[in-house]
Amino acid sequence: MESVMIEPGLHVVSLMTARVPRPQARVQIRAALRELVCLRLGISADEVTIRSLPGCAPQLLLNGQVSAQGVSITHAGQFACAAFHSHGAVGIDVMQVQQVPDMDRVALDYLGPEVRAMLAIASSARRADMFAHAWAQREAHLKCLGQALEEFKPLPGNCRVHALTVPDGFAGVVVTLLPGRAAVPAGGYH
């Protein structure tokens, strides 16, 4: 397990989950996130709950009450990451770098015309990496705003984007709201 501070109040924990079934990997990353929250807030584990409900973003509960501090979790292949943001909403996403069938169409439908244009002029050696980074950024941005993945529409520019240092073969991004900004209300989250 590795934990890093991205900026004051924003911390990311990551771990490799090789040879572990997905349900056990989910338990491991949530335990690591809970440990990180305890460490950052100086509280005991029995005061912290990471609530995960189907179709909803994870919520941080402190002493049973929903906290305004944000948490986000992501998995890709054998790698998992979680973020804790003491100043509010956060979104994190990782993606394995791989060839995506019909990448051009998927980019246009979900990442928008600017990303599609960048991918069209990229060398074939860089295309999969660029796609993975763009996808991770889009997913993290949507998670931060509490929105579900849907066909492309521009997102508000009220977020700060940080590329993560991740193992080779992965792309990772964490997104937070700019100070003084609120997430755009939306229904649900994937």
Image (cartoon, helix red, strand yellow):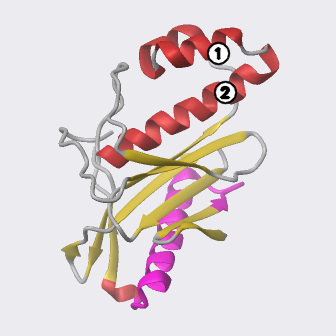
Note whether 113 is above or below 93 in the view shown.
Answer: above
Q: Is residue 15 left or right of residue 144?
A: right
**Do the numbered discs 2 and 1 sit on residues whose CB atoms are within 8 Å?**
yes
| Magenta span includes 176 | no
- Tell me the crowding category of disc 1: few under 14, some 14 to 19, or many 20 or more residues within 10 angstroms, Cα based: many
Q: Earlier in the sequence, mark 2 or mark 1?
A: 1
In the rendered image, which quarter contains the C terminus?
top left
Q: Quadrant of residue 123?
A: top right
The 10 Å Cα crowd at callout 2, few under 14, some 14 to 19, many 20 or more, is some
Q: Which residues are magenta?
A: 15-44
Q: Nearer the viewer, residue 184 or 129?
A: 184
Residue drawn at x 81%, y 20% as measured from the top left: 125
Q: Where 46 sits versus 188, above or below?
A: below
Residue type at the position of mark 2: Met
Instruction: State the residue in front, 94 or 25.
Output: 94
Which residue type does callout 1 highlight? Leu
- In the rendered structure, the answer to whether residue 92 lies left or right of residue 118 reads left
Residue 78: image location, x then y, percent: 67, 49
Residue 153 appears at what percent x and percent y? Answer: 33, 21
Secondary structure beneath label 1: helix
Residue 127 can be seen, yes or no: yes
Q: Which mark is residue 119?
A: 1
Q: Alpha-carbon distance for marks 2 and 1?
A: 7 Å
- From the image, tell me which residue sits under label 2: 130
Residue pictured at 64% horizontal, 57% vertical? 20
Query: Which residue lies at the image location 62% right of the left edge and 31% below the top edge?
Result: 132
Q: Is residue 132 above or below residue 73?
A: above
Q: Quadrant of the N terminus?
A: bottom right
Tell me the residue at 50%/79% (across/down). 35
Q: Nearer the viewer, residue 115 or 139?
A: 115
